[in-house]
Amino acid sequence: MSAPHPQLSADTQSSPIEEVDIDAAGGTSPVSRVVDIDGIPMSGLLLEVPEPRAVIVALHGGATSSAYWDCPGHPELSMMRSAAARGYTVVALDRPGYGASRPHAEELAPVHRRVDLMFAALGQFLGTRSRGAGIFLWGHSVGCEVTVRMAIDDRADDVLGVELAGTGREHHAAAAGILGTPGQYADARGVGELLWTPIDLYPPEIVGGALIASPTPRYEGTVTAGWPRTDFPALAAEVRVPVHFTAGEYEKVWRNDPQALADVAGMFGAAPRVVTDRLPGGGHNLSIGYAAPRYHSGILGFVDECTDAALTATETTAADLISATYGTEDR
């Protein structure tokens, strides 16, 4: 497990301060929420179902927002709606420094602060709502960093499994000379081409990401610099729940060849199960491209398996407890 992190104060004041329907589809549409955590507003989207099988917590990548998980204008591509139709409540949080917490970005650079805020925001979003069998964590791109940190945190005792996409251990050859370094800014146009080509993988109005765009907090440069070769391997080794890892067929930021996928899988030595996949027709932004329905269906199948395993374990434990308490009776 991870080292202990400083906790939020016991008298933390957290309350909903905004709630707005995204569209006119009523209960089938995500709701935008903002909660206050010690004076820092944390925002995101919530799509609740009655009696959920489990709760999916989705964390977006860089330069975007939680809207990534509910593709604007294309409900058929929405992960949130697909998951809800399958019986899951979904919480898509804006990561610290994004969304409503943007004005506080400079004070949110410390790792422990960001992880604390994510757990506190999740708790406020769900409140007394049922979590079903537990929590499934789903991260994309830079969002995979805090996703993995949450998965290994001592507070994550009900995590069922993890899906990671848009990340890796080694950059793709196409990214050479384009991505930034501590001493050199990234080539913005080149990065855009890495993230959004081939353009025919996405609805035309989505290409470039303007509909879901958000400024990137400065601390994220440090996060990305240490991620592939240092932080990712170290954190992955501590994960003790099932892991699914997806690379798009046309991923150009990270290597997506069989050896690269095997290298990623090899980092999760303590996980009881690791599944890797290369999604046909997928680019970097898997959840808002035309391949999204296939991607979401596959991962939701994995979530089903994790949920079923947890429910079976709970039933077995309950049966064993009853047997140990009352014994068995011959009939």
Image (cartoon, rainbow, N blue to C red):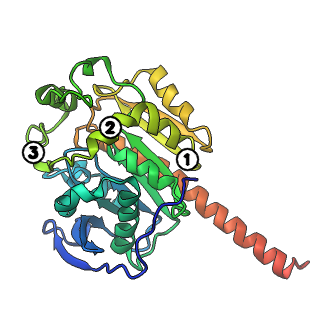
Q: Which residue is mark 1?
A: 239
Q: First in sequence: mark 3 or mark 2?
A: 3
- Tell me the distance, in whole angstroms, between the alpha carbons under discs 1 and 2: 20 Å
Residue 1 on image: x %, y %: 58, 53
**Amino acid type of disc 3?**
Ala
Query: In percent of the image, x 56 and y 41: which residue is there?
Result: 237
Residue 147 or 131: which is nearer the viewer?
Answer: 147
Q: Are marks 3 and 1 in contact (CB under 8 Å)?
A: no
- Tell me the distance, in whole angstroms, between the alpha carbons under discs 3 and 1: 34 Å
Asked which secondary structure carries label 1, the reply is loop
Disc number at residue 224?
2
Residue 112 on image: x %, y %: 41, 57
Query: In percent of the image, x 22 and y 56: which residue is there?
Result: 105
In this rendering, the answer to whether 186 lies above or below 85 is above
**Amino acid type of disc 1?**
Val
Residue 38 or 82: which is nearer the viewer?
Answer: 38
Do we see residue 291 in this rendering?
yes
Q: Which residue is mark 3?
A: 210
Which quadrant would the C terminus be assigned to in this image? bottom right
